[in-house]
């Protein structure tokens, strides 16, 4: 019954200009046993009374002050200042229930004067307080709060509230969202959630941002972007849009060709000791090849608005051996010859790659030099897993040629790659004193899970 009474009082608030129900509100205020109902009755009483100033003392009432604040916030004008002062006190309270009640009012009556207090509550240790603070931040639309909202996307308990806050922000949040998606240093989970958020928007602005974001390096995120664009059923009429897609497609074709070349180069490990290391490295490359192949197929779906063509591409996505050749034939008929010649090697069905039994391929020094193409300034962006396994292989090779490559990787911003570089140097660098000095220059906060002392002890 409590919810019913609260709902009825909320609906009756629309009639607050009329004093008809004042006696009813007074009776509820004096007799009801539920404080939430009494607070709602006080709000209605303030709004319907011709002399609301007589209720100002209620702002100091421990139990009913929230109801008084809401009433005076609605009235505004001369009553705004005492209401704001009281509400700020509730926002700064050490009591989380006060914080939550106050944040609800900030959400319903947003005003810039509450920005500082809401920003503080976004860092509150209790998640239920942060949830309400996120909603209040969305209502306030303060751009300084956006970084906090973005961070909340990493927390499963806060994610839904962060997305709702962004939706409340509206168009003003779109430019910062685009920057966060394009920025490679943004955590992958945040970027994915923002991509999905843009895809859920009914307006065209979100899809335009997704289109521009096709140039990012993360293959899995690009696949998510394309899937969102496909789901939106955008028709690619404008030539500049198709040009962006063709450029991305050509880059991916060149990239997968390079990855396939790397795979061939490292199919022969130079020594039996490094076989396991190259196994991890080759697996990382193969995973990237598979992801890039899938990404190319999804881009083909965007490129051509033809039902038969889309059906053929989807057959290739399912790796159906029976229908593979007819699908390839249809794609050959529908795309330009020059494009098909580039596409054909990348569209071949992925086969299991077995390492050759002979180990008479690269020498350790030549293998280290070849790994340098991946570790230092690769021609195409490679993920941290490939970079880390390349450094692991470098360590197992034991070649002195790997020392400058591992030292160059110390500047890598990804903690896993940095850790792999340090471990490689621990083995490869004969001058332990020089290594010690070099490691001491690395902030321990940049090392993932391993302390500098543990590394030096090894």
Image: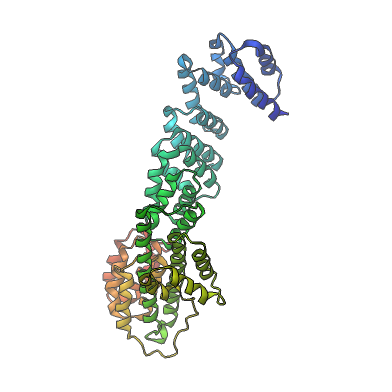
Q: In this view, does 173 lie above or below 209?
A: above
Point out the image quarter for the N terminus. top right
The number of numbered badges drawn on the structure is: 0
Quadrant location of residue 70? top right
Can you give x and y, in whole percent of width and height, for residue 73 in the image? Answer: 51, 21
Q: In this view, does 44 lie to the left or right of 393?
A: right
Q: Is residue 348 left or right of residue 104?
A: left
Q: Nearer the viewer, residue 211 or 263?
A: 211
Q: Residue furthest top?
A: 51
- Say if residue 458 shows up in the picture: no
Q: Which of 333 and 232 is in front in this view?
A: 333
Q: Is residue 276 above or below residue 77?
A: below
Quadrant location of residue 438? bottom left
- Say if residue 241 shows up in the picture: yes
Q: Which residue lies furthest to the right in this view?
A: 1
Protein image colouring: rainbow
Can you give x and y, in whole percent of width and height, for residue 278 in the image? Answer: 41, 79
Q: In this view, does 234 lie above or below 313?
A: above
Point out the image quarter for the C terminus. bottom left
Can you give x and y, in whole percent of width and height, for residue 64 in the image? Answer: 60, 22
Can you give x and y, in whole percent of width and height, for residue 203 in the image? Answer: 46, 43
Q: Nearer the viewer, residue 51 or 97?
A: 51
Q: Which residue is drawn at 38% across and 74% down?
A: 341
């Amino acid at each position: 019954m409590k919810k019913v009474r609260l709902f009825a009082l909320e609906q009756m608030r629309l009639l607050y200009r009329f004093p008809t129900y004042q006696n009813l509100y007074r009776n509820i205020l004096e007799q009801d046993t539920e404080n939430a109902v009494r607070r709602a009755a006080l709000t209605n009483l303030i709004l319907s009374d011709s002399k609301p100033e007589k209720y100002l003392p209620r702002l100091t009432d421990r139990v009913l002050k929230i109801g008084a604040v809401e009433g005076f916030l609605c009235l505004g004008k001369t009553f705004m200042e005492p209401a704001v002062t009281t509400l700020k006190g509730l926002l700064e309270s050490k009591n989380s229930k006060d914080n939550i009640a106050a944040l609800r009012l900030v959400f319903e009556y947003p005003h810039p004067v509450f920005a500082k207090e809401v920003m503080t509550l976004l860092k509150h240790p209790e998640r239920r307080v942060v949830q309400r603070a996120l909603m209040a931040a969305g209502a306030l639309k303060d751009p300084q709060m956006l970084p906090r909202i973005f961070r909340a996307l990493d927390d499963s308990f806060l994610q839904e509230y962060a997305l709702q806050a962004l939706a409340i922000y509206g168009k003003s949040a779109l430019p910062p969202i685009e920057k966060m998606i394009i920025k490679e240093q943004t955590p992958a989970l945040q970027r994915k959630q923002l991509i999905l958020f843009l895809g859920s928007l009914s307006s065209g602005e979100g899809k335009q941002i997704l289109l521009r974001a096709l140039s990012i390096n993360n293959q899995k995120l690009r696949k998510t972007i394309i899937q969102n664009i496909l789901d939106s059923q955008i028709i690619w009429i404008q030539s500049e849009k198709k040009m962006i897609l063709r450029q991305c497609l050509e880059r991916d074709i060149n990239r997968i060709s390079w990855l396939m070349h790397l795979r061939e180069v490292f199919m022969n490990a130079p020594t039996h000791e490094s076989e396991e290391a190259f196994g991890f490295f080759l697996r990382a490359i193969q995973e990237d090849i598979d992801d890039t192949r899938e990404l190319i197929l999804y881009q083909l779906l965007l490129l051509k608005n033809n039902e038969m063509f889309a059906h053929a591409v989807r057959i290739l996505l399912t790796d159906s051996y029976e229908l593979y050749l007819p699908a390839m034939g249809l794609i050959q008929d529908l795309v330009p010859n020059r494009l098909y010649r580039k596409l054909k090697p990348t569209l071949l069905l992925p086969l299991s790659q077995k390492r050759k039994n002979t180990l008479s391929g690269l020498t350790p020094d030549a293998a280290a030099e070849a790994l340098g193409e991946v570790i230092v300034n690769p021609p195409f962006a490679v993920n941290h897993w490939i970079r880390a396994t390349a450094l692991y292989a470098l360590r197992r090779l034991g070649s002195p040629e790997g020392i400058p490559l591992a030292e160059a990787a110390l500047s890598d911003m990804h903690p896993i790659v940095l850790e792999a570089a340090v471990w490689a140097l621990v083995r490869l660098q004969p001058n332990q004193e020089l290594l010690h000095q070099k490691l001491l220059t690395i902030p321990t906060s940049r090392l993932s899970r391993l302390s500098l002392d543990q590394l030096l002890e090894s």
